Amino acid sequence: MLRSDSTRAIFELSRFTLIEIIQSRVFRLLVGGTLLIPLIAVIIASLFMADIGKVYLDVVLSGAHFASMVFTLFIAASLLAKDIDQRICYIILSAPMKRHHYILARYGGLSIAFAILAAALTITAYIGGYFYIGSLAELYQSGFSALMIPMMFFYIFFQYLSLISVAVFFFSWATGTAEILLFTSSVMLFSWAFPPVLAALQTEELASQTPVFLRQLIEVIYQFLPHLNGSNFALSIAHSLEINGRDLLLYTLEHSAYAGISLVLALLLFKRRDL
Amino acid sequence: MNSFAEHSAPYLLLLIFLACLSVARTGGLDNRHTGTELWENPAPVLLDTALAGPVRGLASDFDVLHVFSIYQAANLEQKRQGSTGLWPVMAAYLQRAQEMDPRFFDVYRLSGALLAYDAKMPHLAVQLLEKGTAQLENNWELPFIAGFLTYDQLRDNRLAYSLMKEASIRPDAPPLAVHLAARFLARDEGNAAGIAFLQAMIELLPEGYHAGLKQRISELQRSAK
Protein backbone atom coordinates (compact mmCIF):
# COMPACT_ATOMS: atom_id res chain seq x y z
CA MET A 1 0.00 0.00 0.00
CA LEU A 2 2.77 2.32 1.03
CA ARG A 3 4.65 1.55 -2.15
CA SER A 4 1.65 2.31 -4.30
CA ASP A 5 1.15 5.62 -2.47
CA SER A 6 4.71 6.67 -3.18
CA THR A 7 4.41 5.56 -6.81
CA ARG A 8 1.21 7.54 -7.14
CA ALA A 9 2.81 10.62 -5.56
CA ILE A 10 5.76 10.42 -7.94
CA PHE A 11 3.48 9.82 -10.89
CA GLU A 12 1.21 12.76 -10.00
CA LEU A 13 4.05 15.22 -9.54
CA SER A 14 5.72 13.99 -12.75
CA ARG A 15 2.45 14.59 -14.57
CA PHE A 16 2.13 18.02 -12.98
CA THR A 17 5.71 18.85 -14.03
CA LEU A 18 5.04 17.70 -17.57
CA ILE A 19 1.86 19.79 -17.84
CA GLU A 20 3.68 22.80 -16.37
CA ILE A 21 6.40 22.49 -19.04
CA ILE A 22 4.02 21.83 -21.92
CA GLN A 23 2.01 24.91 -20.95
CA SER A 24 5.09 27.13 -20.91
CA ARG A 25 5.52 29.31 -23.98
CA VAL A 26 9.26 28.62 -24.29
CA PHE A 27 8.67 24.87 -24.60
CA ARG A 28 6.00 25.33 -27.26
CA LEU A 29 8.28 27.71 -29.14
CA LEU A 30 11.09 25.18 -28.90
CA VAL A 31 8.92 22.34 -30.22
CA GLY A 32 7.57 24.61 -32.99
CA GLY A 33 11.12 25.73 -33.71
CA THR A 34 12.08 22.15 -34.54
CA LEU A 35 10.36 22.75 -37.88
CA LEU A 36 12.94 25.40 -38.67
CA ILE A 37 15.96 23.17 -38.08
CA PRO A 38 15.54 20.97 -41.21
CA LEU A 39 14.75 24.09 -43.20
CA ILE A 40 18.00 25.76 -42.13
CA ALA A 41 19.80 22.46 -42.78
CA VAL A 42 18.43 22.36 -46.34
CA ILE A 43 19.53 25.97 -46.99
CA ILE A 44 23.07 25.37 -45.69
CA ALA A 45 23.41 21.95 -47.38
CA SER A 46 22.43 23.40 -50.74
CA LEU A 47 25.55 25.60 -50.64
CA PHE A 48 27.78 22.52 -50.91
CA MET A 49 29.08 20.60 -53.90
CA ALA A 50 28.61 16.93 -53.26
CA ASP A 51 28.41 15.91 -49.59
CA ILE A 52 24.93 17.37 -49.20
CA GLY A 53 23.52 14.49 -47.15
CA LYS A 54 26.39 14.78 -44.70
CA VAL A 55 26.02 18.54 -44.31
CA TYR A 56 22.25 18.15 -43.78
CA LEU A 57 22.85 15.72 -40.91
CA ASP A 58 25.59 17.95 -39.43
CA VAL A 59 23.25 20.94 -39.29
CA VAL A 60 20.31 18.92 -37.99
CA LEU A 61 22.51 17.50 -35.24
CA SER A 62 23.84 20.92 -34.28
CA GLY A 63 20.30 22.27 -34.18
CA ALA A 64 19.32 19.38 -31.91
CA HIS A 65 22.23 20.24 -29.59
CA PHE A 66 21.10 23.86 -29.51
CA ALA A 67 17.46 22.95 -28.75
CA SER A 68 18.58 20.50 -26.05
CA MET A 69 20.82 23.10 -24.41
CA VAL A 70 17.98 25.62 -24.39
CA PHE A 71 15.75 22.96 -22.81
CA THR A 72 18.31 22.11 -20.12
CA LEU A 73 19.07 25.69 -19.17
CA PHE A 74 15.89 27.64 -19.78
CA ILE A 75 13.31 24.98 -19.05
CA ALA A 76 14.80 22.35 -16.72
CA ALA A 77 17.19 24.50 -14.65
CA SER A 78 14.78 27.46 -14.64
CA LEU A 79 11.85 25.35 -13.47
CA LEU A 80 13.92 23.93 -10.62
CA ALA A 81 15.23 27.38 -9.73
CA LYS A 82 11.67 28.73 -9.65
CA ASP A 83 10.79 26.00 -7.13
CA ILE A 84 13.29 27.52 -4.71
CA ASP A 85 12.83 31.22 -5.52
CA GLN A 86 9.03 31.10 -5.45
CA ARG A 87 9.02 28.56 -2.63
CA ILE A 88 6.97 26.11 -4.69
CA CYS A 89 8.89 23.15 -3.28
CA TYR A 90 7.81 24.17 0.25
CA ILE A 91 4.17 24.02 -0.81
CA ILE A 92 4.58 20.64 -2.48
CA LEU A 93 6.60 19.20 0.38
CA SER A 94 4.12 20.41 2.97
CA ALA A 95 1.68 17.93 1.45
CA PRO A 96 2.49 14.33 2.44
CA MET A 97 5.36 13.95 -0.02
CA LYS A 98 8.84 12.77 0.75
CA ARG A 99 11.79 14.78 -0.44
CA HIS A 100 13.25 11.99 -2.55
CA HIS A 101 9.87 11.47 -4.23
CA TYR A 102 9.86 15.13 -5.06
CA ILE A 103 13.31 14.95 -6.73
CA LEU A 104 12.47 11.77 -8.65
CA ALA A 105 9.13 13.14 -9.82
CA ARG A 106 10.61 16.42 -11.03
CA TYR A 107 13.33 14.53 -12.90
CA GLY A 108 10.75 12.13 -14.35
CA GLY A 109 8.58 14.99 -15.65
CA LEU A 110 11.57 16.80 -17.11
CA SER A 111 12.81 13.62 -18.83
CA ILE A 112 9.42 12.95 -20.42
CA ALA A 113 9.17 16.55 -21.63
CA PHE A 114 12.67 16.25 -23.09
CA ALA A 115 11.68 13.00 -24.77
CA ILE A 116 8.78 14.88 -26.44
CA LEU A 117 11.20 17.53 -27.70
CA ALA A 118 13.62 14.86 -28.95
CA ALA A 119 10.76 13.08 -30.72
CA ALA A 120 9.71 16.33 -32.42
CA LEU A 121 13.31 16.92 -33.50
CA THR A 122 13.56 13.40 -34.88
CA ILE A 123 10.30 13.53 -36.82
CA THR A 124 10.95 16.91 -38.45
CA ALA A 125 14.57 16.00 -39.30
CA TYR A 126 13.45 12.65 -40.70
CA ILE A 127 10.78 14.19 -42.92
CA GLY A 128 13.17 16.90 -44.17
CA GLY A 129 15.90 14.36 -44.89
CA TYR A 130 13.60 11.83 -46.50
CA PHE A 131 12.13 14.31 -48.96
CA TYR A 132 15.08 16.64 -49.62
CA ILE A 133 18.08 14.34 -49.56
CA GLY A 134 16.04 11.46 -50.95
CA SER A 135 15.24 13.54 -54.02
CA LEU A 136 18.93 14.17 -54.83
CA ALA A 137 21.11 12.08 -57.12
CA GLU A 138 23.12 9.41 -55.29
CA LEU A 139 26.39 11.31 -55.70
CA TYR A 140 25.03 14.20 -53.62
CA GLN A 141 23.48 12.04 -50.92
CA SER A 142 26.93 10.99 -49.63
CA GLY A 143 25.54 7.67 -48.42
CA PHE A 144 22.68 9.38 -46.56
CA SER A 145 20.35 7.07 -44.73
CA ALA A 146 17.22 8.52 -43.09
CA LEU A 147 17.38 5.68 -40.56
CA MET A 148 20.44 7.36 -39.06
CA ILE A 149 18.31 10.26 -37.81
CA PRO A 150 16.59 8.29 -35.00
CA MET A 151 20.05 7.00 -34.07
CA MET A 152 21.31 10.58 -33.88
CA PHE A 153 18.59 11.56 -31.45
CA PHE A 154 19.11 8.47 -29.36
CA TYR A 155 22.65 9.66 -28.78
CA ILE A 156 21.55 13.27 -28.09
CA PHE A 157 18.84 12.06 -25.67
CA PHE A 158 21.18 10.24 -23.32
CA GLN A 159 23.72 13.05 -23.24
CA TYR A 160 21.16 15.59 -22.16
CA LEU A 161 19.46 13.29 -19.69
CA SER A 162 22.73 13.32 -17.78
CA LEU A 163 22.94 17.11 -18.06
CA ILE A 164 19.37 17.49 -16.76
CA SER A 165 20.36 15.33 -13.81
CA VAL A 166 23.25 17.71 -13.20
CA ALA A 167 20.73 20.57 -12.99
CA VAL A 168 18.75 18.52 -10.44
CA PHE A 169 21.97 17.94 -8.47
CA PHE A 170 22.65 21.68 -8.29
CA PHE A 171 19.03 22.31 -7.34
CA SER A 172 19.46 20.03 -4.32
CA TRP A 173 21.86 22.43 -2.60
CA ALA A 174 21.88 25.76 -4.48
CA THR A 175 20.24 28.82 -2.98
CA GLY A 176 18.43 30.12 -6.05
CA THR A 177 18.23 30.88 -9.76
CA ALA A 178 21.62 32.53 -10.10
CA GLU A 179 23.51 29.57 -8.62
CA ILE A 180 21.58 26.86 -10.46
CA LEU A 181 21.94 28.61 -13.82
CA LEU A 182 25.58 29.50 -13.25
CA PHE A 183 26.67 25.99 -12.20
CA THR A 184 24.58 24.16 -14.80
CA SER A 185 25.76 26.39 -17.64
CA SER A 186 29.38 26.05 -16.46
CA VAL A 187 29.13 22.25 -16.51
CA MET A 188 27.57 22.42 -19.97
CA LEU A 189 30.30 24.71 -21.23
CA PHE A 190 33.09 22.48 -19.88
CA SER A 191 31.38 19.32 -21.13
CA TRP A 192 31.21 20.92 -24.56
CA ALA A 193 34.79 22.12 -24.74
CA PHE A 194 36.89 19.75 -22.62
CA PRO A 195 36.58 16.36 -24.34
CA PRO A 196 37.78 17.62 -27.74
CA VAL A 197 40.60 19.60 -26.11
CA LEU A 198 41.72 16.56 -24.17
CA ALA A 199 41.57 14.42 -27.28
CA ALA A 200 43.62 17.01 -29.16
CA LEU A 201 46.15 17.19 -26.31
CA GLN A 202 46.67 13.45 -26.57
CA THR A 203 48.01 13.73 -30.09
CA GLU A 204 51.77 13.29 -30.15
CA GLU A 205 52.47 16.75 -31.50
CA LEU A 206 50.59 18.62 -28.77
CA ALA A 207 51.35 16.20 -25.94
CA SER A 208 55.04 17.01 -26.23
CA GLN A 209 54.32 20.75 -25.92
CA THR A 210 51.88 20.62 -22.99
CA PRO A 211 53.16 20.58 -19.38
CA VAL A 212 52.38 17.30 -17.62
CA PHE A 213 50.53 18.97 -14.71
CA LEU A 214 48.22 20.75 -17.15
CA ARG A 215 47.39 17.50 -18.92
CA GLN A 216 46.72 15.81 -15.57
CA LEU A 217 44.53 18.68 -14.40
CA ILE A 218 42.46 18.53 -17.58
CA GLU A 219 42.18 14.75 -17.22
CA VAL A 220 40.87 15.10 -13.65
CA ILE A 221 38.26 17.70 -14.65
CA TYR A 222 37.34 15.54 -17.62
CA GLN A 223 36.51 12.60 -15.36
CA PHE A 224 34.07 14.71 -13.32
CA LEU A 225 32.09 15.96 -16.31
CA PRO A 226 29.33 14.35 -18.31
CA HIS A 227 30.81 13.94 -21.75
CA LEU A 228 29.26 15.52 -24.77
CA ASN A 229 31.73 13.26 -26.48
CA GLY A 230 29.55 12.22 -29.34
CA SER A 231 31.61 13.82 -32.06
CA ASN A 232 32.89 10.48 -33.25
CA PHE A 233 29.41 9.02 -33.13
CA ALA A 234 28.05 12.15 -34.73
CA LEU A 235 30.57 12.01 -37.57
CA SER A 236 29.85 8.32 -38.12
CA ILE A 237 26.13 9.00 -38.21
CA ALA A 238 26.56 11.97 -40.56
CA HIS A 239 28.50 9.69 -42.93
CA SER A 240 25.92 6.91 -42.41
CA LEU A 241 28.54 4.50 -41.09
CA GLU A 242 27.62 1.55 -38.96
CA ILE A 243 28.17 2.08 -35.24
CA ASN A 244 29.67 -0.67 -33.18
CA GLY A 245 27.00 -2.17 -30.86
CA ARG A 246 29.47 -2.41 -27.99
CA ASP A 247 30.32 1.31 -28.24
CA LEU A 248 26.67 2.16 -28.29
CA LEU A 249 26.03 0.06 -25.20
CA LEU A 250 28.98 1.60 -23.32
CA TYR A 251 27.83 5.06 -24.33
CA THR A 252 24.30 4.45 -23.03
CA LEU A 253 25.72 2.92 -19.85
CA GLU A 254 28.05 5.87 -19.26
CA HIS A 255 25.30 8.46 -19.49
CA SER A 256 22.75 6.42 -17.55
CA ALA A 257 25.33 5.89 -14.80
CA TYR A 258 26.21 9.58 -14.74
CA ALA A 259 22.52 10.52 -14.50
CA GLY A 260 22.05 7.91 -11.76
CA ILE A 261 25.02 9.18 -9.70
CA SER A 262 23.88 12.82 -9.98
CA LEU A 263 20.36 11.89 -8.93
CA VAL A 264 21.45 9.81 -5.93
CA LEU A 265 23.73 12.64 -4.77
CA ALA A 266 20.85 15.06 -5.27
CA LEU A 267 18.57 12.84 -3.17
CA LEU A 268 21.12 12.64 -0.35
CA LEU A 269 21.83 16.36 -0.32
CA PHE A 270 18.20 17.41 -0.63
CA LYS A 271 17.25 15.11 2.26
CA ARG A 272 19.68 16.92 4.57
CA ARG A 273 18.92 20.36 3.25
CA ASP A 274 17.56 22.89 5.72
CA LEU A 275 14.38 24.13 4.10
CA MET B 1 3.08 69.00 -21.11
CA ASN B 2 2.16 65.76 -19.33
CA SER B 3 0.14 64.61 -22.29
CA PHE B 4 3.11 65.26 -24.60
CA ALA B 5 5.46 63.30 -22.32
CA GLU B 6 3.04 60.40 -22.13
CA HIS B 7 1.86 60.11 -25.71
CA SER B 8 4.13 61.85 -28.20
CA ALA B 9 7.56 61.79 -26.53
CA PRO B 10 8.16 58.01 -26.87
CA TYR B 11 7.40 58.16 -30.61
CA LEU B 12 9.60 61.20 -31.03
CA LEU B 13 12.44 59.44 -29.20
CA LEU B 14 11.91 56.36 -31.32
CA LEU B 15 12.22 58.45 -34.48
CA ILE B 16 15.39 60.14 -33.19
CA PHE B 17 17.00 56.79 -32.35
CA LEU B 18 16.00 55.29 -35.71
CA ALA B 19 17.53 58.32 -37.46
CA CYS B 20 20.75 57.90 -35.40
CA LEU B 21 20.87 54.19 -36.27
CA SER B 22 20.45 54.80 -39.99
CA VAL B 23 23.15 57.54 -39.89
CA ALA B 24 25.52 55.11 -38.14
CA ARG B 25 24.74 52.25 -40.53
CA THR B 26 25.09 54.30 -43.71
CA GLY B 27 27.98 56.45 -42.55
CA GLY B 28 30.73 53.94 -43.30
CA LEU B 29 30.50 51.55 -40.36
CA ASP B 30 29.40 48.73 -42.67
CA ASN B 31 32.95 48.59 -44.01
CA ARG B 32 34.01 46.67 -40.91
CA HIS B 33 32.52 43.49 -42.40
CA THR B 34 34.04 43.59 -45.84
CA GLY B 35 37.72 43.04 -45.01
CA THR B 36 39.47 39.68 -45.21
CA GLU B 37 41.24 40.11 -41.85
CA LEU B 38 38.99 37.52 -40.23
CA TRP B 39 40.06 34.89 -42.73
CA GLU B 40 43.68 35.82 -42.51
CA ASN B 41 43.77 35.24 -38.77
CA PRO B 42 41.95 31.97 -38.17
CA ALA B 43 41.64 31.02 -34.50
CA PRO B 44 44.22 28.55 -33.16
CA VAL B 45 43.22 24.96 -33.96
CA LEU B 46 42.87 24.00 -30.30
CA LEU B 47 40.46 26.86 -29.65
CA ASP B 48 38.55 25.97 -32.77
CA THR B 49 38.31 22.36 -31.61
CA ALA B 50 37.11 23.44 -28.16
CA LEU B 51 34.48 25.73 -29.65
CA ALA B 52 33.30 23.04 -32.04
CA GLY B 53 32.83 20.57 -29.15
CA PRO B 54 30.60 17.71 -30.25
CA VAL B 55 29.60 19.43 -33.52
CA ARG B 56 32.88 18.98 -35.36
CA GLY B 57 31.01 18.10 -38.53
CA LEU B 58 29.37 21.52 -38.63
CA ALA B 59 32.71 23.21 -37.89
CA SER B 60 34.24 21.48 -40.91
CA ASP B 61 31.25 22.54 -43.04
CA PHE B 62 31.85 26.17 -42.08
CA ASP B 63 35.57 25.83 -42.84
CA VAL B 64 34.65 24.64 -46.34
CA LEU B 65 32.27 27.58 -46.74
CA HIS B 66 35.23 29.81 -45.86
CA VAL B 67 37.23 28.06 -48.59
CA PHE B 68 34.55 28.97 -51.16
CA SER B 69 34.59 32.63 -50.13
CA ILE B 70 38.38 32.81 -50.01
CA TYR B 71 38.62 31.20 -53.45
CA GLN B 72 36.35 33.86 -54.95
CA ALA B 73 38.22 36.67 -53.16
CA ALA B 74 41.62 35.28 -54.19
CA ASN B 75 40.60 35.09 -57.84
CA LEU B 76 39.29 38.63 -57.72
CA GLU B 77 42.47 39.89 -56.05
CA GLN B 78 44.61 38.03 -58.57
CA LYS B 79 42.75 39.62 -61.47
CA ARG B 80 43.03 43.11 -59.98
CA GLN B 81 46.56 43.02 -58.56
CA GLY B 82 48.22 40.15 -60.43
CA SER B 83 48.90 38.23 -57.21
CA THR B 84 47.21 37.24 -53.98
CA GLY B 85 48.24 36.27 -50.47
CA LEU B 86 45.02 34.38 -49.85
CA TRP B 87 46.01 30.92 -51.12
CA PRO B 88 47.85 29.90 -47.91
CA VAL B 89 44.77 31.01 -45.97
CA MET B 90 42.59 28.79 -48.15
CA ALA B 91 45.02 25.93 -47.55
CA ALA B 92 44.80 26.50 -43.77
CA TYR B 93 41.01 26.21 -43.84
CA LEU B 94 41.18 23.04 -45.92
CA GLN B 95 43.62 21.50 -43.46
CA ARG B 96 41.37 22.49 -40.59
CA ALA B 97 38.26 21.06 -42.26
CA GLN B 98 40.16 17.82 -42.84
CA GLU B 99 41.19 17.63 -39.18
CA MET B 100 37.64 18.32 -37.99
CA ASP B 101 36.05 15.72 -40.24
CA PRO B 102 38.49 13.39 -42.05
CA ARG B 103 35.62 11.76 -43.97
CA PHE B 104 34.38 14.99 -45.53
CA PHE B 105 34.84 14.33 -49.23
CA ASP B 106 34.39 17.92 -50.42
CA VAL B 107 37.66 18.76 -48.66
CA TYR B 108 39.54 16.30 -50.87
CA ARG B 109 37.77 17.38 -54.04
CA LEU B 110 38.70 20.98 -53.32
CA SER B 111 42.26 20.03 -52.42
CA GLY B 112 42.69 18.03 -55.62
CA ALA B 113 41.37 20.86 -57.76
CA LEU B 114 41.70 24.31 -56.18
CA LEU B 115 44.69 23.73 -53.93
CA ALA B 116 46.72 21.85 -56.52
CA TYR B 117 45.88 23.84 -59.66
CA ASP B 118 44.64 27.28 -58.64
CA ALA B 119 46.75 27.83 -55.54
CA LYS B 120 49.68 25.91 -57.08
CA MET B 121 50.24 24.03 -53.82
CA PRO B 122 50.29 20.41 -55.04
CA HIS B 123 52.57 19.26 -52.20
CA LEU B 124 50.01 20.28 -49.64
CA ALA B 125 47.15 18.83 -51.70
CA VAL B 126 48.93 15.46 -51.87
CA GLN B 127 49.66 15.63 -48.14
CA LEU B 128 45.97 16.17 -47.36
CA LEU B 129 44.92 13.39 -49.71
CA GLU B 130 47.47 11.04 -48.18
CA LYS B 131 46.10 11.84 -44.71
CA GLY B 132 42.63 11.02 -46.02
CA THR B 133 43.97 7.83 -47.62
CA ALA B 134 45.27 6.67 -44.26
CA GLN B 135 41.99 7.48 -42.49
CA LEU B 136 39.52 6.20 -45.12
CA GLU B 137 40.80 2.69 -45.47
CA ASN B 138 38.24 1.50 -47.99
CA ASN B 139 38.28 4.45 -50.35
CA TRP B 140 40.18 4.18 -53.63
CA GLU B 141 39.54 7.69 -55.01
CA LEU B 142 41.77 9.55 -52.54
CA PRO B 143 44.99 7.59 -53.23
CA PHE B 144 44.11 7.74 -56.91
CA ILE B 145 43.75 11.54 -56.98
CA ALA B 146 46.90 11.85 -54.83
CA GLY B 147 48.71 9.57 -57.30
CA PHE B 148 47.56 11.64 -60.24
CA LEU B 149 48.70 14.91 -58.63
CA THR B 150 52.05 13.34 -57.77
CA TYR B 151 52.46 12.24 -61.38
CA ASP B 152 51.14 15.44 -62.97
CA GLN B 153 52.45 18.14 -60.65
CA LEU B 154 55.21 16.72 -58.47
CA ARG B 155 56.69 14.61 -61.29
CA ASP B 156 57.43 11.82 -58.87
CA ASN B 157 56.50 8.72 -60.85
CA ARG B 158 57.67 6.34 -58.18
CA LEU B 159 55.39 7.79 -55.52
CA ALA B 160 52.59 8.16 -58.09
CA TYR B 161 52.93 4.48 -58.90
CA SER B 162 52.77 3.41 -55.28
CA LEU B 163 49.72 5.62 -54.62
CA MET B 164 47.88 4.35 -57.69
CA LYS B 165 48.78 0.80 -56.82
CA GLU B 166 47.36 1.41 -53.35
CA ALA B 167 44.17 2.74 -55.00
CA SER B 168 43.82 -0.23 -57.30
CA ILE B 169 44.00 -2.81 -54.50
CA ARG B 170 41.39 -1.13 -52.33
CA PRO B 171 38.17 -3.14 -52.02
CA ASP B 172 35.87 -0.81 -53.98
CA ALA B 173 38.34 0.08 -56.77
CA PRO B 174 36.84 -0.43 -60.23
CA PRO B 175 38.96 -2.18 -62.91
CA LEU B 176 39.06 1.24 -64.61
CA ALA B 177 41.35 2.50 -61.84
CA VAL B 178 43.98 -0.10 -62.65
CA HIS B 179 43.65 0.61 -66.36
CA LEU B 180 43.94 4.38 -65.86
CA ALA B 181 46.91 3.99 -63.54
CA ALA B 182 48.71 1.97 -66.18
CA ARG B 183 47.96 4.60 -68.82
CA PHE B 184 49.25 7.49 -66.71
CA LEU B 185 52.48 5.73 -66.12
CA ALA B 186 52.97 4.81 -69.77
CA ARG B 187 54.81 7.80 -71.17
CA ASP B 188 53.07 7.83 -74.55
CA GLU B 189 49.58 7.95 -73.09
CA GLY B 190 50.22 10.13 -70.03
CA ASN B 191 48.87 13.38 -71.48
CA ALA B 192 45.68 11.97 -72.96
CA ALA B 193 44.88 10.09 -69.77
CA GLY B 194 45.68 13.18 -67.71
CA ILE B 195 43.28 15.30 -69.76
CA ALA B 196 40.55 12.68 -69.40
CA PHE B 197 41.09 12.55 -65.63
CA LEU B 198 41.03 16.34 -65.25
CA GLN B 199 37.84 16.49 -67.29
CA ALA B 200 36.27 13.95 -64.97
CA MET B 201 37.31 16.11 -62.00
CA ILE B 202 35.73 19.17 -63.65
CA GLU B 203 32.40 17.37 -63.81
CA LEU B 204 32.42 16.99 -60.04
CA LEU B 205 32.89 20.72 -59.41
CA PRO B 206 30.51 23.66 -59.97
CA GLU B 207 31.33 25.94 -62.88
CA GLY B 208 32.91 28.69 -60.81
CA TYR B 209 35.72 26.36 -59.71
CA HIS B 210 37.00 25.14 -63.09
CA ALA B 211 39.64 27.80 -63.86
CA GLY B 212 42.76 26.02 -62.55
CA LEU B 213 41.78 22.63 -64.01
CA LYS B 214 40.94 24.12 -67.42
CA GLN B 215 44.27 25.91 -67.50
CA ARG B 216 46.07 22.64 -66.82
CA ILE B 217 44.07 20.85 -69.53
CA SER B 218 45.07 23.44 -72.12
CA GLU B 219 48.72 23.14 -71.00
CA LEU B 220 48.57 19.37 -71.48
CA GLN B 221 46.86 19.78 -74.84
CA ARG B 222 49.58 22.20 -76.00
CA SER B 223 52.38 19.89 -74.89
CA ALA B 224 50.70 16.93 -76.63
CA LYS B 225 50.91 18.80 -79.93
Image (cartoon, rainbow, N blue to C red):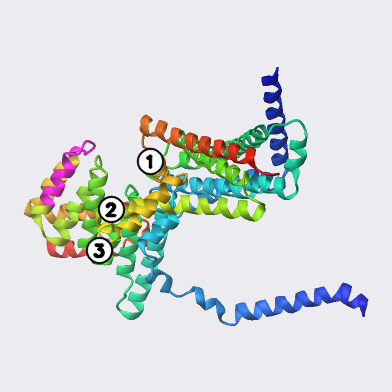
Instruction: Please tell me which residue is depicted at 66% across the width and 53% down the height of the picture.
Output: A177
Report the Cα–Cα distance between label 3 and label 2.
31 Å
Q: Horizontally, is A242 left or right of A224 in the view?
A: left
Q: Which amino acid type corresponds to the residue marked 2 in the rendered image?
A: Thr
Place of residue B40 in the rendered image (x, y in percent of width and height, measured from the top left): 37, 71
Query: Mark 3 is on which residue type?
Result: Tyr
Query: Which residue is under mark 2?
Result: A203
Quadrant holding the C terminus of chain A:
top right
Q: Specify which label sits upstream in the sequence, 1 or 2.
A: 2
What numbered label is drawn on residue A236?
A: 1
Q: Identify the residue at horizontal 65%, vertical 35% (top origin).
A: A109
Host chain of mark 3? B
Residue B52 appears in which quarter of the rendering?
A: bottom left
- Residue B35 shown in magenta: no
Residue B66 lies left or right of residue B6; in this view the side is: left
Which span is picked out in magenta?
B160-175
Do callouts 3 and 2 point to residues on the same chain? Answer: no
Instruction: Assign a secondary structure to mark 1.
Output: helix
Residues at marks 3 and 1, CA–CA distance in whole angstroms: 31 Å
